[in-house]
Image (cartoon, rainbow, N blue to C red):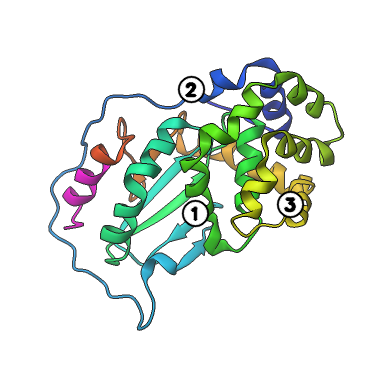
Amino acid sequence: MIKLSLKSALSLAVAAPLALALAACGDKTATDPSAQAAPVAAVPAPAGTAWRDTVTVTADGGHMVGNPNAPIKLVEYGSLTCPTCAAFAVEGMEPLLSKYVDSGRVSFELRNFAVHGPVDIVLAQMARCGTKEAVIPLSDQVWHNVQSLVGPLQSNQAAVEQAMSLPMDQRFNAMAQIGGFYDFFASRGISADQAKACLADVPALEALAKQTDTYANRDGVNGTPTFALNGNKLDGVNSWASLEPVLQRAGAR
């Protein structure tokens, strides 16, 4: 099982090129393990609201959007630097929200699985710097722009290694500076001062890394993206094309 303390996560940035970490995403052939279930009735959101605007921070440290009592509960263990996760976000996030979450049949929970090292942790922490409602939209924006965000870090490994030698409450801010993350998030509502305070919060960063340990050891997650439906891992399902039929078979139709 993967054991990723913040200390070991930091060492990954020095021990392995970022490009190698980015290539470590899931690439399994899609399968559909679900049995056919009866259709589930839509559940209207409270008057004047949409289910996609209802966000709950779960006991497992994830951010869940949608009807908290939805009968079909989808979880993604996702890395913000994973190209396969990014492809899912680009292709599937909007139809997932508009067609399934807004129907009240399905809830969607994102659990950050920061297995690819400190860049994962930096981006996940910055996405959490604002309101709980902003976490999934900001994560989606990161996925839509992941190559431009990680490019400066890939091409400047010496600066990354130098950042890693700084005290713990400074190194993540230094990495964000190298990657141009402050400007990216500032244009999306997270000020530089707000982001810097978040990235200096070592206990919060430690907690984020420990969640990854928990997901690996308790839930058996060993790659990204990993999806679970009503508590059952969907082995081999890592794209919208492979996930949507599973939702429909589970009754979201």
Q: Which residue is mark 2?
A: 24
Q: Nearer the viewer, residue 73 or 50?
A: 50
1 or 2: tag closer to the N-terminus: 2
Against 106, is 30 above or below? above
Q: Secondary structure at mark 3?
A: helix
User: Which quadrant holds residue 227?
Assistant: top left
Residue type at numbered disc 3: Cys
Does residue 209 show up? Answer: no
Quick check: is 247 in the magenta stretch?
A: yes
Query: Is label 1 in contact with label 2 (beta carbons under 8 Å)?
Result: no
Q: Tell me which secondary structure the magenta stretch mostly adopts.
A: helix
Neighbours of disc 1 within 10 Å: few (<14), some (14-19), many (20+): many
Tag shown at residue 70: none
1 or 3: tag closer to the N-terminus: 1
* CA–CA distance in space, label 2 to label 3: 27 Å
Residue type at numbered disc 2: Ala
Q: Which residue is mark 3?
A: 198
* CA–CA distance in space, label 1 to label 3: 17 Å
Residue 198: percent from the left, percent from the top?
A: 73, 51
Tag shown at residue 136: 1
Residue 94: percent from the left, percent from the top?
A: 34, 53
Q: Which residues are magenta?
A: 243-253
Residue type at numbered disc 1: Ile
